[in-house]
Image (cartoon, helix red, strand yellow):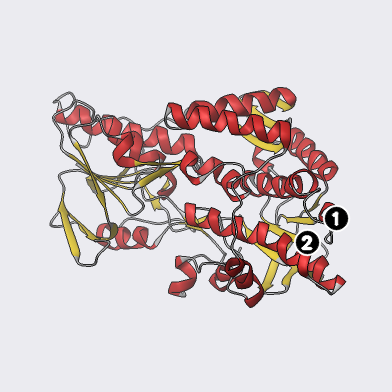
Amino acid sequence: MVIVGGGFAGLSAARAFRNRPVQVTLVDRAGHHLFQPLLYQCATGILSEGQIATPLRYILRHESNVECVLAEVTGFDVAARTVIATRPTGGVLEIPYDDLIVAAGAEQSYFGHDEFAALAPGMKTLADALTIRRRVFGAFEMAETATDPEERRRWLTFVVVGAGPTGVELAGQIREVATRTLRDEFHRASVADTRVLLFEGGESALASFGPKLAGRAARTLRRLGVELFVHSVVTEVDRRGVAVRGPDRTVTRYEAGTVLWTAGVQAPPLAHALARQTGAEQDRAGRIRVAPDCTIPGHPEISVVGDLMALDHLPGVAEVAMQSGRHAGLRIRRQVEGRAAAGTGKPFRYRDLGSAAYLARGRAVVSFGRVRLGGFVAWCLWIAIHIGFLTGFRNRAGALLTWMITIGWAARRERALTAGQVADLRDGRHAAIPEQAARGRNTARSP
């Protein structure tokens, strides 16, 4: 059994084989399980990277039949049933399989403008979060030393593209950094005047939460000081800011020192390699279209789960990943144990456990079935949900203690910077170039 990816889907699949007569090889290029829903808190100095990223070997230390391999999967030989990967030190690694689960996740989409990636980092990996952390806190340092008032205003202007949960949470946290955490630490720059511009191409922020909660979220963001623009599409990004096409089709220029991108996802190149080998269909974002049991049609030995699968318009959220990964693992386990024949898997049925988004201190929105909650009660539920899903007691206790300190004293300890990192902001070297920019690929079409 080979599993590609150690995210929510891959980890759930691996755990399904505990104490079973199956030899599992889990291949991941990062070597850790990342709790992506809290990446924005790492990016804004609340949580450390160790609190949201746990080594896969540690998580699976009691699974004697699971072997973790640190390598990057680059392709497949479906005829030979082999996964092809590259070792960290170079060289090709070929891993044979009887059954394969591909849970490689998704990457940020720039809708055909991958050149934006070098200037407007997304937030999909731990490296992305650390890059954003340096940019956010570095921008305040640049504002403090700026001698030109216009330049100071530019550094105190932040643009966030995309008003889904990640964009809304990130925008709200940047305002809280400026108005609470840093308000007494800077003497020349008026950090309380920091502008956070949130641009959304759709009709509302948090549209997936429904009109009532979306409206409530918009009002909370505006009270916090976030400037929300809907029906607004970013058409250009450069070192000085962005150009935005508004609802009246007029293009407006906004000067900004920091641009962050949270709009849209697409399948990684690995999906295209798998599709070529299997003849599988892909959707507009490059995800693999799977059969109801999460297998590739014509290849019952290959399952695609999590953000990489296209099935029944399911959203790319952690719960879908966990449930689909476990479904694939249990289906294969039943076949191994002789309780089901190959190719007769039950259809995957997603159980929607709801959604939650953090807006500000003491404010959140939660959607579960017909229940719609906002405000303090929703915020308490948000804390309970995220504490429950964090991996390991130490991370849960550490996160809870850190949140208490942040709420009570507005302290954010995870924001160390060096002079060299701040100089990189000035020189335009402020973002590690994401993979899609480095490849120069345009894998997603403009909407």
> For residue 418, what is the image quadrant?
bottom right
* Image x and y of residue 321, in percent: 43, 39
When the figure is inspected, residue 85 is found, relative to residue 399, above or below; the finding is below
Secondary structure beneath label 2: loop
What is the x, y in percent for residue 442? Answer: 49, 71
Image coordinates for residue 110, horizontal then vertical, percent: 57, 64
Q: Residue at x 68, y 43 (%)?
A: 207
Crowd class of label 1 (few under 14; some 14 to 19; many from 20; radius 10 Å):
some
Please name the residue shown 51% across and 67% down the image.
432
- Quadrant of the image for the C terminus? bottom right
Which residue is disc 1 drawn over? 193
Q: Please provide percent x and percent y for residue 388.
A: 50, 25
Q: Which residue is mark 2?
A: 156
**Residue 441 makes an appearance in the image:** no
Along the line of sight, which residue is nearer the eye, 445 or 269? 269
Q: CA distance from mark 1 to mark 2?
A: 8 Å
Give whichever of 284, 260 is nearer the camera. Answer: 260
The amino acid on which the numbered mark 1 sits, given as a three-letter code, is Asp
Q: Residue at x 44, y 58 (%)?
A: 286
Horizontally, residue 327 falls left or right of residue 122, namely: left
CB within 8 Å, label 1 to label 2: yes
Amino acid found under the numbered disc labelled 2: Leu
* Label of residue 368 in the image: none
- Which comes sooner in the sequence, label 1 or label 2? 2
Q: Residues within 10 Å of mark 2 (few under 14, many from 20)?
A: many
Q: Is residue 15 left or right of residue 123?
A: left
Report the residue at 33% width, 41% height from top: 56
Given residues 360 and 394, the one toward you in this image is 394
Quarter holding residue 334: top left
